[in-house]
Amino acid sequence: MDVSREIKMTVFLSHIHEESDLATALKAFIENAFLGMVNVFVSSDSQSIRPGNQWLKVVTDALNSCSLQLILCSPTSIKRPWVNFEAGAAWIRGIQVIPLCHSGLDRDRLPNPLSALQSVNLLNPAGFQTVISEIAQALRVRTPGGDVATFLDEIRKIEVALLRAPLETARRLNDTPEQGAVGSGIIVAPKDNEEVHQRIVVRGTIYALHSDLRAWLVVKTPVGDLYPQGRVTRNEPDWEREVRIGLAQWGADEGAVYEIHLVAAGPDADYQFDRYLRGEGPSRDGLGPLWPGDATILDRTCVIRRDLRHPDIAS
């Protein structure tokens, strides 16, 4: 008997078929980081389900034996019944379930019952490190190291491919994306965890956008306030716009983490964002912690506010 296989901890990674590349990359990182002490079950992976095995039985057995469940949550996956079924099965067993938000889905926009769980943003290094720490705690071992920055860069590239896929499919069919689709777009610069000053230039690409929607850049502060920065032009697919990050006072929010969101805004959100910029809202201190109901996050990036010292000033 292979004793090493008997003592492995199983982590069930729930995902949809379209996001199998993301699941496979996450499986490889976790298993390598824990030196084979963890088996990450991925239903789309041939190592998790061998040819000839009954798919449903293997999945059910994995749900019954896993010690922790991770759920890849995107704007697409949270609408699929199977992902919610797997989450419910783990929840009933009383094991820990951690939603991993990605591809533009913010933690604040998780639907019930996933919103009741402690979730993390997959591309946030601190959030991802929390997941690794939870696994280490379950194994009763020290949290392992690993090149998290390189791994998250790989995840971002996979996300970009996922965002491009619907438009590329439409182009191959010589058609346009379905009328009900929100669209897709990405923020190219700045990169996640880039250190920035108060005013920076944000660059990106819009691949598709529903004709009834408008694209906006919105900055989210560490305390959750939303600051609309202005519309992004849809006349050209590649765009850039200057935005303000943080407070004007030198040193007031040194080291604070801000989120920059590319948002597809419906009529209500577009009105609220525009009203804020015109100074007609209830407060100029921030729009508030809640996104307007018809706003969808297309992409996001986190930046770290740093005050740039003049070279003549001693550090």
Image (cartoon, rainbow, N blue to C red):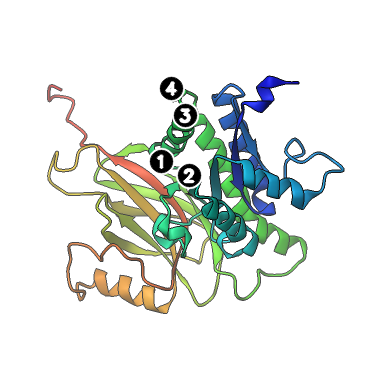
| Mark 1 surroundings within 10 Å by alpha-carbon count, few (fewer than 14), some (14 through 19), many (20 or more) | some
Q: Are marks 1 and 2 in contact (CB under 8 Å)?
A: yes
Looking at the image, tell me whether mark 2 or mark 4 is earlier in sequence order. Answer: 2
Give the amino acid type for the residue marked by disc 4 in the picture. Answer: Arg
Query: Residue 198: percent from the left, percent from the top?
Result: 24, 45
Q: Earlier in the sequence, mark 1 or mark 3?
A: 1
| Residue bearing mark 2 | 122
Disc number at residue 127?
A: 1
Q: Which mark, by number, is residue 44? A: none
Instruction: For mark 3, give the secondary structure.
Output: helix
At x 31% / y 63%, what residue is drawn?
A: 228
Labelled disc at residue 136: 3
24 vs 171, nearest the viewer? 24
Instruction: Give amino acid for label 2.
Output: Leu
Is there CB contact under 8 Å for labels 4 and 3? Answer: yes
Q: Amino acid at mark 3?
A: Ala
Residue, disc 4: 142
Q: How busy is the neighbourhood of tag 4: few (under 14 within 10 Å), some, or many (20 plus)?
A: few
Left or right of 109 on screen, residue 176: right
Whether residue 148 is visible, yes or no, is: yes
Instruction: Give how far apart the Cα atoms at labels 4 and 1 are.
Output: 17 Å
Residue that appears at 55% across and 45% down: 69
Q: Earlier in the sequence, mark 3 or mark 2?
A: 2
